[in-house]
Amino acid sequence: MGEASPSYLRSRVAASRIAEVNPDARIIAILRDPADLVRSLHLQLLKEHVETEADLRRAIASEQTIRAGLRVRRYSDHVNYVEQLRRYDDAFPAEQLLILIYDDFRRDNAATVREVLRFLGVDTAPATISVEANPSVRLRSRRLDALVRALYAGDSRSARAARNALRTLLPKRMRGDSLAAIRRRLLYGRPAEADEAVMRELRLRFKGEVVALSEYLGRDLVSEWGYDRVE
């Protein structure tokens, strides 16, 4: 039995509460270059209509928000990696923690999966099939996406009639697609290339965290992630 919630890593109470419920739990964390993570998160929040600012630089500048009565930073709070990992170090023995790097997972998915299976003490023999899940996309039109969401989620007679009418109006090659597939093809596109100036600003901002993480894990992520090239 397992459970995956990225928010557990940045939660201030999750580690201790998990340990209370199941002190034998095995914890797996996968960490990504902070600048890349923030850019990907921005695209995801735009897609989910959580973020309204399409410009990444401006979104970061206005990231502070109030959530459950607490002042939080929508992006930066995700990458306090060392502080987050220490909470799990305090709650669990070292042999129950596995820290992975996203780049390794992308570079050799099968090897990373085998490492996870060994850590969990389960059979590593079955072959794995890599699947691209939750790729970053660009939302073509926020307004149109909101309209289609409402149409897709509605269960009234009028919503069902509108869905049927939409299929009738679509090009013949798309009529057999599900509404979810239609939505993906009409509303989502490939993200624009990253703005190198903005990415450099993010790397400058998060360099201290990457230096600390490198020391904490005993791995030179400063060089691997290119933070040694920003001053």
Image: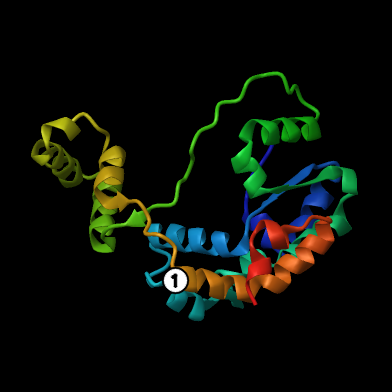
In percent of width and height, residue 98 lies at 78, 45
Position of residue 30 in the picture relative to residue 88 (left or right): left
Quarter of the figure with residue 207:
bottom right
Frontmost residue, 136 versus 210: 210
- The front one of 34 and 116 is 34
User: In this picture, is 118 found above or below 155?
Assistant: above
Q: Residue at x 69, y 32 (%)?
A: 111
Residue 16 in view (yes/no): no
Q: Amino acid at mark 1?
A: Leu
Q: Is residue 36 above or below residue 124?
A: below
Q: Nearer the viewer, residue 113 or 47?
A: 113
Whole-percent x and y of residue 186? 24, 47
The residue positioned 79% from the left and 42% from the top of the image is: 26
Q: Residue at x 48, y 38 (%)?
A: 132
197 vs 100: above or below: below
Label 1 SS: helix
Residue named by callout 1? 56
